[in-house]
């Protein structure tokens, strides 16, 4: 599968790679107009894809930053949308192709949270461990998307500590999405607003800036973006395990 080449990110450590985040919503559980109404209400900035192959996809801009009121990143936006969806909903976020975050809900209740490397969060302490957290939720993910035979390979995939010098987290995410039968074109979302090699054409997306479209969105979005770029969304793992302090046991218990 084609993966886009890494590009420079605008965040602070100079690493190379794409940053993007999205919510994947079952199209039979909520209408496009309901999604749009919810996004307008929190002044969301990003793209809304047309319903395709049974899914609605909402992509945040910036993918790793604050995209809505209340210091919400794409994961927090997905949590809000999950309250309106009877079925499963998945939030994905890739940060500079060096960190993958996955959070899943079922009928509005969070049931899985995964981070491939919590040390990559902005402002993380130097002693935060780099090991993946939440790989045990692979069983839940496989169940949610009716792929029971995928639990073991998905667990192995999420447990793997990738060599960041040779493997991008977009590659891991692409495999996760294909295993679960979800739209794998998302791995190219970092290319927006340019055309992606697969998935919807840019013209098919609804572009929202601060919950508005058109000229109004451009004007309001420019003002709000200046404020949001000084903020960070909550970390995907709020209190990650640290070296010398009991490791994973201290985080879990």
Image (cartoon, helix red, strand yellow):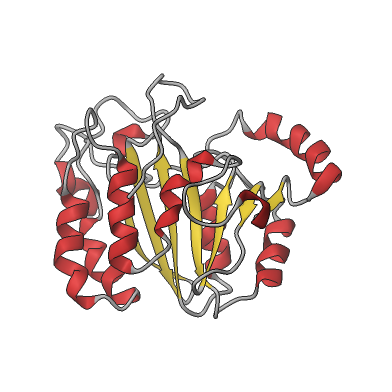
Q: Please provide percent x and percent y for residue 148.
A: 22, 77
Q: Please provide percent x and percent y for residue 110.
A: 41, 66
Going 85% across and 44% down the picture, which residue do you hit? 216
Q: Please provide percent x and percent y for residue 49.
A: 60, 59
Asked if one can make out residue 166 in the rendered structure from this viewpoint, the answer is yes
Going 24% across and 37% down the picture, which residue do you hit? 167
Image position of 13 (left or right of 194):
left
Image position of 233 (left or right of 50):
left
Q: Quadrant of residue 84?
A: bottom right
In the figure, 60 relative to 166: above or below?
Answer: below
Q: Quadrant of residue 127?
A: top left
Q: Quadrant of the C terminus?
A: bottom left
Going 63% across and 51% down the picture, which residue do you hit? 47
Outermost residue toward the right in this view? 216
Asked if one can make out residue 239 in the rendered structure from this viewpoint, the answer is no
In the figure, 34 relative to 225: above or below?
Answer: below
Q: Quadrant of residue 88?
A: bottom left
192 and 25: which is toward the camera: 192
């Amino acid at each position: 599968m084609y993966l886009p080449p890494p590009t420079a990110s605008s965040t602070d450590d100079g690493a190379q790679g794409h940053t993007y985040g999205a919510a994947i919503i079952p199209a039979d559980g909520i209408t496009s107009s309901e999604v749009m109404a919810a996004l307008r209400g929190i002044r969301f900035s990003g793209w809304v894809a047309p319903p395709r192959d049974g899914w609605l996809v909402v992509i945040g801009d910036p993918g790793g930053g604050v995209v809505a009121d209340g210091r919400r990143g794409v994961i927090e936006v997905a949590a809000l949308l999950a309250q309106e969806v009877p079925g499963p909903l998945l939030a994905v976020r890739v940060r500079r192709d060096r960190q993958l975050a996955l959070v899943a809900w079922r009928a509005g209740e969070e049931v899985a949270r995964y981070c491939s490397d919590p040390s990559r969060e902005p402002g993380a302490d130097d002693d935060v461990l780099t090991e993946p957290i939440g790989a045990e939720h692979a069983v839940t993910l496989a169940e949610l998307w009716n792929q029971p035979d995928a639990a073991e390979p998905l667990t192995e995939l999420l447990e793997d500590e990738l060599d960041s010098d040779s493997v991008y987290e977009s590659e891991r995410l692409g495999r996760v999405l294909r295993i679960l039968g979800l739209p794998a074109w998302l791995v190219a979302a970092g290319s927006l607003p340019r055309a992606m090699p697969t998935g919807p054409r840019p013209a098919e997306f609804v572009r929202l800036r601060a919950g508005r479209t058109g000229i109004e969105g451009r004007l309001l979005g420019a003002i709000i973006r200046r404020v949001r770029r000084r903020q960070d969304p909550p970390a995907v793992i709020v209190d990650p395990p640290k070296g010398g302090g009991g490791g994973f046991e201290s985080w879990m218990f």
